[in-house]
Amino acid sequence: MKLVVLSGLSGAGKTVALKQYEDLGYTCIDNIPLALLGPMITRMLAKSGHERYERIAIGVDARESPREIRRFPQHLARLKARGVDVHLIFLTASDEIILRRYSETRRPHPLADETTSLAEAIERERTLLAPIADLADEPFDTSQMNLHELREVILQRLPEAVKGKLAVQFVSFGFKNGVPGDFDYLFDVRCLPNPHWNLALKDLTGRDEAVEQWLDAREDVQRMLRDIREFLEPWLAAFRRQDRAYVTIGVGCTGGQHRSVYLVERLARHFRKSFDPVIVKHKELR
């Protein structure tokens, strides 16, 4: 098991970083009570071999109790003693930048209240999180980063993100639930025949063999697959030549259950022949 612990000051970008790990296929849990971390990892280790539990990212911040934060070194030591590969990232930024970010977003700081100003809350948080910050494998100062640059920094720290390689992520989703952000390319496949209207297929997904066979037999589905594939091949190669690290491709149908899932699986299968890593995410499937 690989466990990434993300911590840091409020406003330094922890939520953005955790979202990046989620997009890269990690199972992500934010603000888990540290007292529950050991039992949770024990249960996951008991399911060794289950893909979902091979890569975990958790968020730890000032919402945790001061007592448990002080005990963080002991929690970390016990995890490492269990053989868990733990990597601790701590995000920070200057007081001026954090003050500006809170001013722009108008979000409340978790430690600010009627008697504690924002500046005082930031100072208190630095002191509170010191036991975690002192153990960080990688402290990131995000003062000069926007959210896209932070995502890129996180990606570049991954073992697979070496120079000259391109991480390609395919995401299926349902338009009825809204369009996710951060797509480099987006393909709308709602014009294709829909297995939803076949009673035998309605409750299945695009990963089920019966749905795959049904869509395999539709020429317009196969033509769409070829067209998307032929469009992406030269442009993904161009991104790789420019040392682009990460490209996200969205494929959407109405509900995100059948057509988009099928096409994402087929596209990933094809592009794994020439790109590594190729990441698959199905927004509507659980």
Image (spheres, grey):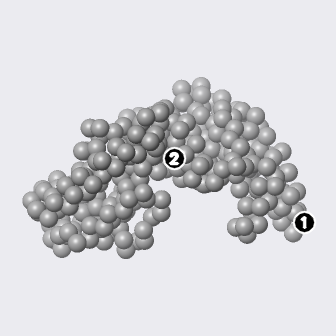
Q: Position of residue 3 (x, y in %)?
A: 54, 37
Residue occupying the point 68% across, 41% down: 140
Mark toward the start of the polypeptide (1 vs 2) = 2
Three-letter amino acid code at disc 2?
A: Tyr
Q: Which residue is mark 2?
A: 21
Q: Position of residue 115 (x, y in %)?
A: 90, 66
Residue 47, can we see it?
A: no
Residue most toward the right?
Answer: 115
Q: Is residue 222 above or below residue 241?
A: below
Q: Position of residue 119 (x, y in %)?
A: 86, 58
Q: Quadrant of residue 136?
A: top right
Residue occupying the point 23% across, 52% down: 230
Three-letter amino acid code at disc 1?
A: Thr
Label 1 crowd bin: few (<14), some (14–19), many (20+), radius 10 Å: few
Residue 74, can we see it?
A: yes
Residue occupying the point 66% across, 35% down: 138
Secondary structure category for the residue under label 1: loop
Q: Which residue is mark 1?
A: 115
Quadrant that contains the C terminus: bottom left
